Image (cartoon, rainbow, N blue to C red):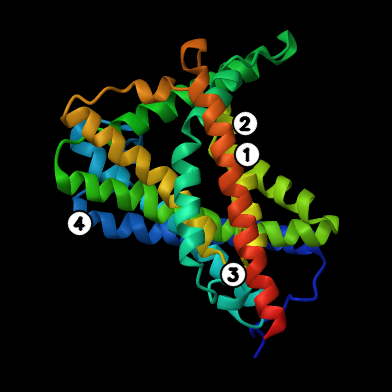
């Protein structure tokens, strides 16, 4: 009787934030515990007895790490989003904007945006990498560099595969699951809370994007990831469907996974990471800015026309 849909729909935004954090912690602990128990028969490991398994990035242990990465995504992002939506809205699917299908043309345009934005992302990442903090924050800066280095090591270990089955597993673990989970939580739940809190759509989008970028704990990629979060936030506002930012997020991650797979197995040049970073490739950056700006305008125009059509009908 107590737990019914929309129970906290009238709660203040700050109350929803604290409740959301509570749900995230509880959900993660429950899902992680279940994941640890299931790992005993499946992987023949007992994390209760040997917790150092999660710090072992040897090739023999990569599948275990990918398994726990998926468990973590479910526990931190996917399950909490549905639980929160149950309490915050009368209809979970409607609250998370899962009940509206994206327009086919918008999907195509979004995919092109994520791919053609690579020079912009590289340029912003280069600027971000030059970040130098004041001397008083030296210890914090060293911690950031260590976190960045560890994240890169894990990513490289995950991506290192020359088997097609490994590629599909990486697409699932690195592209599909994170795209769904992170968008449900940061755009589907938190962005809405922050918009209501600030009474401003733009501030709500920006705050959610800052949290989204900070959550990755890769501070030297903070700026491009935050701006991508802003773009994903506007996609949700314009389209009124969570599927469009999910698809955009998926394309971004999937392109990286597939590209790195073929560059490793077929010796394709890896210079794509440098496009837009230096003077020699500045022309690509200029074209990227122009094309991405135009594509975003087309997406906005496309989604605005759908709103007008919906109003008329």
Position of 178 relative to 237 (above/below): above
> Of label 4 and label 3, which has the lower sequence position?
4
Q: Circle 4 is placed at which residue position?
A: 42
Q: Residue furthest top?
A: 135
- Which of pointers 4 and 2 indicates the residue nearer the eye? 2
> Of label 3 and label 1, which has the lower sequence position?
3
Quarter of the image where one finds residue 188: bottom right
Distance from Cα at disc 4 to Cα at disc 3: 33 Å
> Of label 4 and label 2, which has the lower sequence position?
4
Label disc, if present, on residue 39 of the rendered structure: none
Distance from Cα at disc 1 to Cα at disc 4: 40 Å
Instruction: Report the quarter where the C terminus lies.
Output: bottom right
Disc 4 is placed on an element classified as helix
Label disc, if present, on residue 223 of the rendered structure: 2
Disc 2 is placed on an element classified as helix
Q: Position of residue 296 (x, y in %)?
A: 60, 48
Q: Position of residue 130 (x, y in %)?
A: 60, 14
Q: Residue at x 52, y 32 (%)?
A: 288
> Of label 2 and label 3, which has the lower sequence position?
3
Label disc, if present, on residue 227 of the rendered structure: 1
**Near-viewer residue (109 or 230):** 109
């Amino acid at each position: 009787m107590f737990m019914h849909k929309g129970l906290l729909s009238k709660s203040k935004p700050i109350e929803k934030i604290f409740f959301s954090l509570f749900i995230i912690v509880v959900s993660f602990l429950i899902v992680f515990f279940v994941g640890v128990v299931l790992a005993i028969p499946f992987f023949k490991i007992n994390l209760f007895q040997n917790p150092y398994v999660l710090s072992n990035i040897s090739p023999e242990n990569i599948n275990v790490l990918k398994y726990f990465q998926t468990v973590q995504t479910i526990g931190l992002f996917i399950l909490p989003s549905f639980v929160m939506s149950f309490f915050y809205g009368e209809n979970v699917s409607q609250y998370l904007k899962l009940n509206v299908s994206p327009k086919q043309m918008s999907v195509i345009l979004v995919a092109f945006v994520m791919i053609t934005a690579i020079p912009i992302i590289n340029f912003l990442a280069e600027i971000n990498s030059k970040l130098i903090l004041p001397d008083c924050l030296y210890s914090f800066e060293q911690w950031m560099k260590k976190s960045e280095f560890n994240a890169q090591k894990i990513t490289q270990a995950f991506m290192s595969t020359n088997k097609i089955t490994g590629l599909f597993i990486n697409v699932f673990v690195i592209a599909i699951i994170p795209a769904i989970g992170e968008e449900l939580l940061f755009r589907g739940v938190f962005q809405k809370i922050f918009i209501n809190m600030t009474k401003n759509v733009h501030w709500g989008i920006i705050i959610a994007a800052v949290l989204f970028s900070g959550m990755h704990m890769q501070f030297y990629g903070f700026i491009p990831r935050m701006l991508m979060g802003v773009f994903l936030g506007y996609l949700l506002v314009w389209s009124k469907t969570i599927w469009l930012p999910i698809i955009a997020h998926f394309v971004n991650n999937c392109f990286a996974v597939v590209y790195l797979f073929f560059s490793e197995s077929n010796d394709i040049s890896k210079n794509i990471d440098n496009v837009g970073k230096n003077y020699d490739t500045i022309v690509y950056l200029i074209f990227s800015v122009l094309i991405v700006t135009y594509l975003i305008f087309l997406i906005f125009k496309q989604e605005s026309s759908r709103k007008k059509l919906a109003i008329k009908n």
